[in-house]
Image: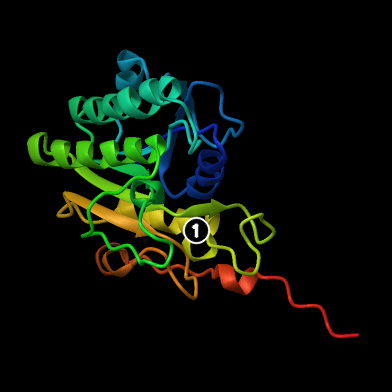
Amino acid sequence: MRTVLITGAAGRIGTFLAGQLAGRYTLRLSDRVAATTDVAPFVPADLAVYDQVRAACDGIDTVVHLGADPRVDAPWESLLPANVAGTYHVFEAAAAAGCRRVVFASSINAMGAYPHDTQIRTDMPLRPANLYGATKAWGEILGRLYADTRGLSALCLRFGAVITGPVHHWIYPGSPFMSAVLTLHDLTALVAAAIDAPDRLRFGIYHGVSANRWQRMDLSDTRDELGYAPQDDAFAMLPAPEAEP
């Protein structure tokens, strides 16, 4: 059974993911604050402190790096320690600890400046629309560097608009976000596919949206290389129209 470290384990996505992956992998959870789940041992670590991150990586096969300031309008003063230095610390610590792979939680925001009616492909240039997106682009570039120079497998997952359930402020007729929706159920399947992907995959950028009727990000590489098969469709979550009186 693979040993998997989840950073950012106290967050919304990390908490859900830990509960879903417990039993499938030997988990270790890490965050600045204590995780709210007890499904696996917890190791406190501040991403801004390299020695703490390095200790959390000892004996780990795969690091799932979720930890970050997730706010699209986060100021530079918050992004620098968490998303910039922190992501570097994770890649460096994983390489130093002899980990096999880092699964990096990137974001659609790394490509957010493309028009909403453009389907984003993995071969298109990075085009962030905010500093948060730029930090995710930084993480993808770090992944390429560490795959090429340190022998670390780095798989970057560009999460779409992650929702926790069918009732969400992004789910409404005409919403520009629905094509980018990624449910937690499909996100879990995507992360597991990346953890289990064959060792020959040294680096890759993979899009993560659900099986939406129209998809903001093309899933060809994710389906072909990771075997990702999303199940949910944001458009099917729209409330039924009220009957005419």
Question: Is 233 left, or right, of 60 in this rendering?
Answer: right
Q: Is residue 42 left or right of residue 244?
A: left
Residue 72 appears in the rendering = yes
Q: Residue at x 34, y 45 (%)?
A: 128
Rendered residue at 34%/25% (across/down): 86
The x and y percentages for residue 232 are 54, 68
Looking at the rendering, which quadrant does residue 11 occupy? top right
Image side of residue 243 versus residue 73, left or right: right
Foreground of the two, 148 or 140: 140
Q: How is the image coloured?
A: rainbow
Instruction: Give whichever of 114, 44 is nearer the camera.
Output: 114
Q: Quadrant of residue 137?
A: top left
Q: Nearer the viewer, residue 33 or 213?
A: 213
Within 10 Å of the Cα at label 1, are there few (<14), some (14-19), or many (20+) other Cα atoms? Answer: many
- Residue at 19 percent across and 30 percent down: it is 95
Residue 15, image x, y percentages: 55, 39
Visible residue check, residue 45: no
Of 220 and 55, which appears nearest the observer? 220
Q: Position of residue 185 (x, y in %)?
A: 53, 58
Query: In the image, what residue type sits under mark 1?
Result: Leu
Quadrant of the rendered image containing residue 38: top right
Count of labels shown?
1
Q: Secondary structure at mark 1?
A: strand
On the image, numbered disc 1 is attached to which residue? 182
What is the x, y in percent for residue 164? 61, 52
Residue at 46% in and 73% down = 214
